[in-house]
Amino acid sequence: MKIIISPKAVKELKKIPKVDQIALTRKIRLIIDPVANTNEEKLSGFKNIYRVRVGNYRIVYRKTVSEVYIILIGHRKDIYRLINQLFR
């Protein structure tokens, strides 16, 4: 399975403190592992879009059979507002 990270997600990831960046990148690697328990939750109102919690941060991604597309990475207080702006 292939991981694609959007430019917006990369930009937001660079703003996050280094310790949290490491935790987020580890979780991104676990997303593609079918055996790992990532506690992903489907976002209601969206098709094939999931989120994963990593401390105070969220990874929002779209999952298909062959790839995982990381849409957004951000703080929990901002991420849902960004999702609504992006998709609605």
Image (cartoon, rainbow, N blue to C red):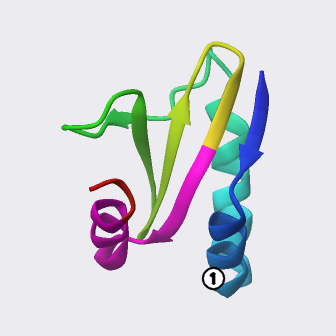
The verdict on residue 76 being magenta is: yes
Left or right, 15 with respect to 56, comes to right
Let me know if residue 41 appears in the view: yes
What residue lies at 76% left-to-right and 37% top-to-bottom? 3
- Relative image position of residue 75 (x, y in whole percent): 43, 75
1 up-or-down from 23: above or below:
above
Q: Secondary structure at mark 1?
A: loop
Residue under numbered circle 1? 16
- Relative image position of residue 64 (x, y in whole percent): 58, 20
64 up-or-down from 21: above or below:
above
What residue lies at 70% left-to-right and 70% top-to-bottom? 21
What residue lies at 77% left-to-right and 21% top-to-bottom? 1
Left or right, 78 with respect to 12, comes to left
Q: Amino acid at mark 1?
A: Ile
**Furthest residue in direction left, as rendered:** 45
The verdict on residue 55 being magenta is: no
- Relative image position of residue 86 (x, y in whole percent): 39, 62
Let me know if residue 40 appears in the view: no
Magenta segment range? Answer: 70-85
